[in-house]
């Protein structure tokens, strides 16, 4: 194989470097890191880290010694172009790297708000450790924050901010929260929990302008004509995959860097993994781009296996979690394209799951404070199993009996 160069030291890039060594890969590994920290975990940035007092070290996958011991060349630099014919990556510092195999693990970046005043200091985003740290330092009790977007990150931030005593308004264009990602059963549950905690949620409206005193945000106007005062705006309107390096190198890109079921691009010397990759999925048919830790780390393990002589098509089962206030949402499988939802458990007791079916086949389970259902779903779905909707709805049906 020769030297493996990995562009991006997020969840996917870090895991690939670690897994290559675990699989006995003996050649040079270069892990390019363009953030000013050792590789770190993102999920706590909108959860425990934002809430707590821990330092950046609490987020690191491994201490610096790990990279030295494992002979992983963790280089602080940014890739600026790829010369596929010469198998070279040019870096922002002016240096260049030769590769035998190149892996694009460039992740995604915040989608920016495109309205006047969106560049004010009190308009914030939440993707990197630096962004989370500076938000944590900035927020104080009594401030008024408008959160734009009721997706996972917007709602996780909203719950944390509310717990810290801020006045929180969430503005969402869709007619329910997390509409793109979860069933309406789950949306309604979280909407009512956040509302009960004192968060005001405004659905079916958009922020059309940001008012300022010339320096700071003072308020926002909504598409329905309302105005709201605000000291701070936090934007969570999704991400854009970092596909530009691949596109400029002439590799096919669509809503992600296109890769086959082995996570290889059109160039046999270049793979793409994690948030940036649009991968062909035999399991689901068609192509998928997912944004989750599971997807990033399982992609990494699949490519590490291939590069050490054990090539198999990628067949990871998607799973995900989101912590919002006291509640834990966990998703197993892909809960899109379902035609029937069966609820198991008790919504009123804040412990239930939505079992999603397509054509009578279980495709995914969304669980609220029901870790057992979630783990069951991961095992059953990974094995391409199913239970009937009647069994799912029957509280006396023993889920474990379906796992043989
Ligand atoms: P990233 O983690 O984005 O890493 C890509 C890295 O590549 C970045 O460091 C980037 O700066 C770098 N890079 C890009 N271009 C270059 C270049 N040209 N040269 C060098 N480096 C480059 N997922 C869950 O499953 N559960 C959760 O609860 C959850 N919570 C989240 C909370 C937050 C606040 C965020 C932001 C994400 C959360 N996610 C969660 C999603 C999860 O973190 C991502 O899916 C995961 O980080 C993807 O890993 P990745 O390595 O593909 O990309």
Image: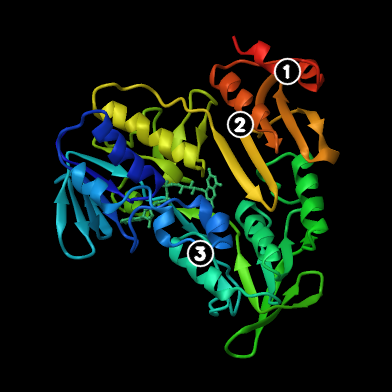
Instruction: Determine the secondary structure under disc 3.
Output: helix
Which of disc 1 and disc 2 is earlier in sequence? Answer: 2
Residue 43 visible in the shown view: yes
State which mark lies toward you, 2 or 3: 3
Q: Does the Cβ of the disc 1 residue fall within 8 Å of ligand 1? A: no
Please state which of residues 253 and 319 is positioned toward the viewer in this rendering.
319
Residue located at (26% from left, 46% from top): 66
Residue located at (27% from left, 46% from top): 6
Q: Residue furthest right?
A: 348
Count of labels shown? 3
**Which image quadrant is residue 96 in?**
bottom left
Q: Does the Cβ of the disc 3 residue fall within 8 Å of ligand 1? A: yes
**Which image quadrant is residue 340 in?**
top right
Q: Is residue 12 left or right of residue 342?
A: left
Which of disc 3 and disc 2 is earlier in sequence? Answer: 3
Q: Which mark is residue 332?
A: 2
Q: Which mark is residue 157?
A: none
77 shown above or below 387: below
């Amino acid at each position: 194989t020769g030297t493996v160069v990995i562009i991006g030291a997020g969840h996917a890039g870090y895991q690939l470097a670690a897994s290559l060594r675990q699989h006995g890969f003996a050649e040079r590994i270069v892990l390019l890191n363009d953030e000013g920290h050792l590789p770190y975990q993102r999920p706590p940035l909108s959860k425990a880290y934002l809430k707590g007092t821990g330092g950046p070290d609490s987020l690191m996958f491994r201490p610096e010694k790990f990279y030295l011991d494992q002979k992983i060349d963790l280089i602080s630099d940014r890739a600026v172009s790829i010369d596929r014919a010469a198998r070279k990556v040019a870096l922002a510092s002016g240096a260049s790297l030769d590769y035998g195999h190149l892996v694009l693990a460039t992740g995604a970046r915040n989608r920016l708000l495109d309205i006047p005043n969106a560049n004010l200091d009190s308009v914030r985003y939440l993707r990197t450790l630096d962004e989370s740290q500076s938000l944590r330092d900035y927020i104080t009790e009594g401030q008024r924050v408008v959160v734009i977007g009721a997706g996972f990150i917007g709602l996780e931030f909203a719950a944390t901010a509310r717990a810290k005593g801020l006045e929180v308004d969430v503005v969402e264009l869709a007619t329910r929260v997390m509409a793109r990602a979860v069933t309406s059963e789950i949306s309604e549950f979280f909407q009512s929990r956040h509302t009960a905690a004192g968060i005001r949620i405004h659905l079916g409206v958009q922020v059309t302008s940001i008012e300022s005193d010339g320096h700071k945000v003072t308020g926002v106007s909504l598409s329905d004509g309302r105005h709201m005062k605000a000291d701070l705006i936090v934007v969570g309107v999704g991400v854009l995959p970092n596909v530009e390096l691949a596109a400029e190198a002439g590799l096919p890109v669509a809503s992600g860097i296109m890769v086959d079921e082995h996570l290889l691009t059109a160039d046999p010397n270049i793979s793409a993994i994690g948030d940036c990759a649009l991968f062909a999925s035999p399991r689901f048919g068609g192509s998928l781009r997912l944004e989750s830790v599971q997807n990033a780390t399982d992609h990494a393990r699949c490519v590490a296996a291939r590069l050490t002589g054990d090539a198999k098509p990628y067949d990871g089962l998607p799973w995900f979690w989101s912590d919002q206030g006291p509640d834990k949402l966990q998703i197993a499988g892909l809960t899109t394209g379902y035609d029937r939802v069966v609820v198991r458990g008790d919504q009123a007791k804040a412990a239930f799951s939505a079992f999603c079916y397509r054509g009578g086949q279980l495709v995914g389970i969304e669980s609220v404070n029901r870790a057992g259902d979630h783990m069951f779903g991961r095992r059953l779905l990974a094995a391409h199993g199913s239970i009937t909707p009647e069994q799912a709805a029957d509280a006396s049906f023993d889920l474990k009996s379906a796992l043989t």
